[in-house]
Image: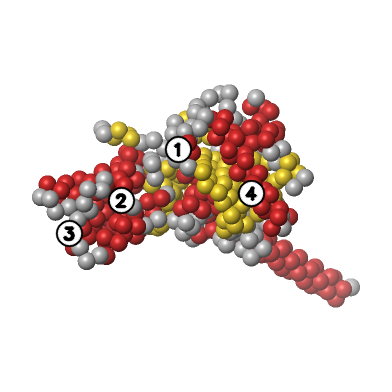
Amino acid sequence: MADDTLSTTGIAQHGGARLPSVDIDSFNIELKDDEGFIGDRASKGAFRKIFDRWRKPLRKSGEDPFGDEPSDEISKKKLDEMLVGDDTEASAVVHSAIEEFAQELAYVTRRFLKTKAWAGTERIVVGGGFRESRLGELAIARTEIILTSEDIEIDMVPIRFHPDDAGLIGTLHLAPSWIFEAHDSILAVDIGGTNIRCGVVETRWKKAPDLSKAEVWKSELWRHADDEPTREGAVKRLVKMLKDLIGAAEAEGLKLAPFIGISCPGVINADGSIAKGAQNLPGNWESSKFNLPASLVEAIPEIGGHDTAIVMHNDGVAQGLAEVPFMQDVAHWGVLTIGTGLGNARFTNRKKDNGKDEKKAKGDDESEKSEKKTKKAKEKAKENAKENAKA
């Protein structure tokens, strides 16, 4: 099955370490300490536990400004409002939770930076749903300050695109650049433990060949966790979502590429199967008998009259890839995605084989060759002149 999968879906390797713009030095590292996986210390759930712990003293005195609402059900919007609201106790509780969480995130970041794969990292992009809030932005900024105070020189920046869009936009960087010359959009899928999101991503390649102006034209969201479908049911629903988007794109007159980029949790094998890390998805996605890219190719064999090509990669990698255009001033950078768990990936930028730098270098080489030829010609002319004078 692996051979069939590679031949029917392949213009690139699933879960590959070498992509058009970057080399992926590592992804989905599972570091541990005495308390378990360190990523659990800087997850969305970890923040909620910290927040709840700071509420307890007020709850005992009967003066909890958040009332009886459970900590994990208070929205990020409400927490953001409490940060700047008139209730100083509520604001203090949220600020205290942010500070403690930042300390945890700093600890986790230190551990990653000590690994061989993350050595020399200059910047870390922080994505995931937690980033989509003022409290998330403050936690990220505070983490950088903590690390800087320890003489750890690292930039910590929130992901630029909306977290819901970043995973879709990032899949553009899984595709070979020639796809963008004849098409203006692609299909993208972002699979998570709670939701599956599909979208049509406009490349805007002619305006920005580095894909910095790409955006999601249209997307659909399905909370599969609410429906608890079987694996087969989930794939069937995913296929319907993709076909609806294909129809919408064609009706709009978009030139949709015959390409689907997929962002998915876990370690992705070269044949499109999932080695591990997909335990929160509906059904057994790690089965050797299941292959999502192959299932989608079977259901959608053509897009716009051309054979469908699919590339799938880890969801943390895909979110990070959305930042490629904005990371060109550093060589080594990483991404941490704060959600149900802590996604992670480390990248090294690749020098373009056909970019401006090479053209400049080529021009310099040609200029140098021309100068050498001119010099030789002058020397030859002098020698000829001397011989003529002797004659």
Quadrant (top left/top right/bottom left/bottom right) for the C terminus: bottom right
Q: Give whichever of discs 1 and 2 has the lower sequence position.
A: 2
Does residue 161 appear in the picture of this structure?
yes
Q: Where is residue 196? Give x, y as percent.
A: 51, 42
Question: Residue type at mark 3?
Answer: Glu
Q: Is disc 3 in contact with disc 1, using a CB cutoff of under 8 Å?
A: no
Estimate how packed mark 4 is, as few (under 14), some (14 to 19) or many (20 or more) residues with alpha carbons within 10 Å.
some
Q: Which residue is mark 1?
A: 225
Residue 74 numbered tag: 2
Element at badge 1?
helix
User: Distance between the Cα atoms at labels 3 and 1?
Assistant: 35 Å
Q: Is disc 1 in contact with disc 2, using a CB cutoff of under 8 Å?
A: no
Q: Give whichever of discs 3 and 4 has the lower sequence position.
A: 3
Q: Which residue is mark 3?
A: 89
Q: Quadrant of residue 4?
A: top right
Element at badge 3?
helix
